[in-house]
Amino acid sequence: MTGASTQAGGATAPGTGKGSGRFFRRAAKEAPVSSRGLTTRGRCLLAGGIAAVACAIVLDERDLLRIGVFAAVLPVIAMIAGSVRRMRLTASHLVSPTRLDPGTVGQVVLSIRNAGASRTGAIEISERPTPDLTGGVRCLVPPLRPGDRAQTDYPLLAQRRGRFMLGPPSVRVGDPFGLWEDNRTLPVRSEVLVVPTVVDLAGMPISTGTRSAAADRAMSGATGGDPDVGIRHYRSGDDIRTIHWRASARHDDLMVRLEEPVSHGGAVVMLDHREPAHAG
């Protein structure tokens, strides 16, 4: 169940029982996408009122004229009142934990703050779903006074690994009669990282040897003082600075140093060939 709460002031207060987290914010270089105007109900009421006034004039019906004038004036008043009101809203996400594993559950706290100088109406907050992570959120919060903040939270269920983006949130503010509305998208997006699950390995295969590939190629003719230096026969194109002169004198042929050390152990490379393990 999604809950919403309001809190005065400019600081965010996470709800009870929420784990540690941190804000992820991306500065937006563009203004919020917004649209303001009459709703479908308001346009229909305005058109019906105008039609009723026209019919009343033709038919000389005073009662119908009063009803038509009232129906036509009400959307106009709502439009004027809504156009005069200026809202400034800011949003932020609080993601906890900062990283998820596939199959684990996290939480997002979406916070909306009234940064303007006037009181807002009731605000409808919505955020679209993110596939394989969350189903989004949609809720209604009470009017906010200047500086007040409203919060709502929703869960995250990581289904596959990857990098996901939350948001941007959309807000809608309308009049009590539903005749006028202000829709805007706040430019806030947050990143959620789902990392691969760490699995402890058991039953490691028996190593086939303790020497590296370079040690297998190294010849036993390396002289004292260079215990970790392997040598091989000179090949056309080898840098002359890599010639091992002591070994060349010993073998009566040009010998070249091997660059890699030969005294270290090997490495085991394991491949997970299970198809479901690589989904996504």
Image (cartoon, rainbow, N blue to C red):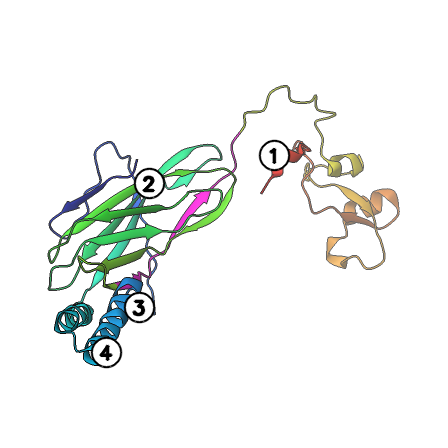
Residue at 31 percent of width and 69 percent of height: 31
State the SS at label 3: strand
Q: Which mark is residue 43?
A: none
Amino acid on which disc 2 is placed: Tyr
Residue 22, located in which quarter of the rendered image?
top left
Reading the image, the residue beneath label 2 is 154
Instruction: Report the amino acid beneath label 3.
Output: Ser
The quarter in which the C terminus is drawn is: top right
Say which residue appears at 11% left-offset and 63% top-offset.
118
Lower sequence index among marks 3 and 1? 3
Assess disc 4: are there few (<14), some (14-19) or many (≥20) residues with their C-alpha within 10 Å of its C-alpha. Answer: some
CA distance for labels 2 and 1? 28 Å
Q: Which residue is mark 1?
A: 277
Please name the amino acid that badge 1 sits on.
Answer: Ala
Name the N-terminal-most of marks 4 and 1: 4
The residue wearing badge 4 is 54
**Mark 3 — residue?**
35
Q: Establish if 8 lies above or below 208.
A: below
Query: Toward the viewer: 166 or 68?
Result: 68
Please state if 48 lies on the left or on the right of 256 as rendered.
left
Q: Using the numbered discs, state the Cα–Cα distance from disc 3 to disc 2 in whole angstroms.
A: 26 Å
Count neighbours of disc 2 (C-alpha within 10 A) and say few if under 14, some if 14 to 19, many if 20 or more.
some
**Category of crowding for the residue at label 1, using alpha-carbon neighbours closer than 10 angstroms: few (below 14), some (14–19), many (at least 20):** few
| Position above or below: 138 against 171 | above
Of circles 3 and 1, the one toward us is 3
| Mark 3 vs mark 1, CA separation in Å | 45 Å
Q: Nearer the viewer, residue 60 or 23?
A: 60
